[in-house]
Amino acid sequence: MTELNNWVQVQVEGRPVSQNDYFRQLASGEMSREQFVLTQRQFFFAVRYFSRPMAALMARMPSSGLRQGLIHNLMEEHGGDEIGGRLDPALAHDRTFLRFLETLGATDGMNEKREGESVRAFNTSLMGTCLMEPVETAFGCLGVIEHVFAGLSSIIGETVVRRGWIATSDLVHYTLHAQIDERHAADFFKVVADAWEEGGERRQAIEDGVHLGLHVFDRLYADLWKEACGK
């Protein structure tokens, strides 16, 4: 593990998203199935949007070599296989998440459903970062979100199976992300590895991105829980 990866892990452990109100209530059993469904219906809009900031960041990269990691990740977001071959629409991440919602019986009215304030704030924060902030900040932000989501996917998957809300074979989306998001995170951090080694302002930009990613991801889940409670 590189110095950058070690540093990121320390930051993640210092601000564990898995310990915020959302995941505490989910793990303790205090979050009802109905509340979980409400949060997941909103989370769909974050899943559907996530590739768009990534694409915006890719457009800012000056060379094909720097774009390759992003292209690979974008391919998988849209249903590409592990080696970046053909696209299977059924494996696109918004589709796999909809299938997860279907198994919960939670897709009725989704065509008319609008994203709420929490998800809109998260989405626009990522887009603004990828369009306007230093690219090192953007890669740090997206990278740490991917890294954290791999672990959160395992937690969510294990919890909903344990509580009998869904069968293991029907997890689809969360099983997929538990497997691939660590690799996605590694792709992002690889792009900025030289900037980290260089130090100075470029390293600081990566640090800013990681801290921002942890902040907005933590807030997303905390605010989704508040919305589900009617607060």
Image (tube, rainbow, N blue to C red):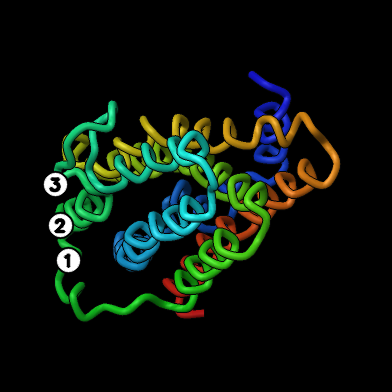
Disc 3: CA contacts within 10 A as few (<14), some (14-19) or many (>=20): few
Where 75 falls versus 212 (above or below)? Answer: above
User: Does label 1 or label 2 sit earlier along the sequence?
Assistant: 2
Check whether the beta carbons of the residues at disc 3 and disc 2 lie within 8 A of each other: no
Spot occupied by residue 209 in the image (x, y as percentages of width and height): 67, 51
**Residue 150 in view (yes/no):** no
208 shown above or below 43: above
Q: Which corner quadrant of the image does residue 130 belong to?
A: bottom right
Closer to the camera in the image, 108 or 94: 94
Report helix, strand or loop for mark 1.
Answer: loop
Identify the amino acid type marked 1.
Thr
Name the residue tied to disc 3. 90
Label 1–label 2 contact, CB within 8 A? yes
Q: Position of residue 125 (x, y in %)?
A: 56, 67
User: Badge 1, how many Cα within 10 Å: few under 14, some, many 20+?
Assistant: some
Choose top left, top right, bottom left or bottom right for residue 45.
Answer: bottom left
- Which residue is at the far top? 1
> Which of these two is toward me, 44 or 222?
44
Question: Which quarter shows the N terminus?
Answer: top right
Instruction: Name the residue that disc number 2 marks.
Output: 102
Q: Earlier in the sequence, mark 3 or mark 2?
A: 3
Residue positioned 58% across, 35% down in the render? 191
Instruction: Give me the residue at 54% from left, 38% from top.
Output: 188
What residue is pinned by disc 1? 107
